[in-house]
Image: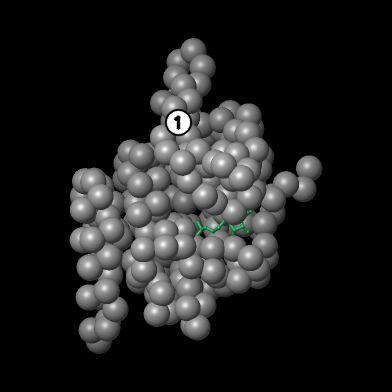
Amino acid sequence: MEDPWVEHRLKMVETQIISRGITDERVIAAMKKVPRHLFVPAEMVDYAYNDEPVPIGEGQTISQPYIVAYMTEALHLQPEDKVLEIGTGSGYQTAILAELVKEVYTVEIIASLSLRAQEVLGKLGYRNIYFKIGDGTFGWEENSPYEAIMVTAAPARIPEQLEKQLKPGGRLIIPVGSAFQDLYLVTRERDGFKRKKLLPVRFVPLITTH
Ligand code: SAH
């Protein structure tokens, strides 16, 4: 059956993603494919393809499409990569990652959000996603190291434990700050970590239980 939302999705990719400079063909293909409207609450479905974050309940939001594409592209993901995501939320970003890499490990602190994301992603047929409910501030060590880590909630500073779970050459993308936040790309190099500030952003705060 033809997905009535295809047109909205392709327009979103054209006007919000490609026209703003995203060029990675694999990222563009994933954004064209993943049905974003299935990841928002039923009453928000008309906003799913808009150029903005959308509330998903529990005071949380699904990130703006452009930010999802930008953060994903910045990680330079390869098909064999193992990726850690902190902040499953709706599971939309998780699906984009799962389209691009071999395995995605995703941690969410709010159980109801994780369970809903598990249901949606299961129905869509993803079999390469591993879920954990808990505080992701310190990553998910058992499955480390990772080629890439993406954090979609903002801590006050970059958690050292996350950097440590990167493979040599691995990349971490993370918003940092409180009222004012910046997106950082951390690269693990032979002799330490290179931290590059990319752009100002606005994410929900990373909840810390420790
Ligand atoms: N990537 C998500 C964005 C959700 S917003 C999406 O596309 O929908 C950020 C998410 O991070 C929220 O669901 C919030 O509950 C979660 N979060 C906040 N602090 C966390 C923590 N310490 N560990 C794991 N998840 C956390």
The N terminus, quarter of image: bottom left
Disc 1 marks which amino acid? Lys
Q: Is residue 141 visible?
A: no
Could you say whether the residue bearing mark 1 is in a helix, strand or loop?
Answer: strand
Q: Is mark 1 within 8 Å of ligand 1?
A: no
What residue did someone put label 1 on?
197
Image spot of residue 204 (x, y percent): 59, 54
In which of the image's four quarters is ligand 1 placed? bottom right
Position above or below: 155 against 196: below
> Depth check: 16 or 131 in front?
16
- Quadrant in which the C terminus is drawn: top right
Q: Is residue 53 left or right of residue 16?
A: right
The residue at the point 46 percent across, 62 percent down is 53
Q: Is residue 38 above or below residue 67?
A: below
| Residue 167 percent across, percent down from the top left | 48, 29
Residue that appears at 48% across and 73% down: 40
17 or 168: nearer the viewer: 17
Q: Nearer the viewer, residue 180 or 131?
A: 180
Q: Residue 121, how many percent across, how many down?
A: 46, 68
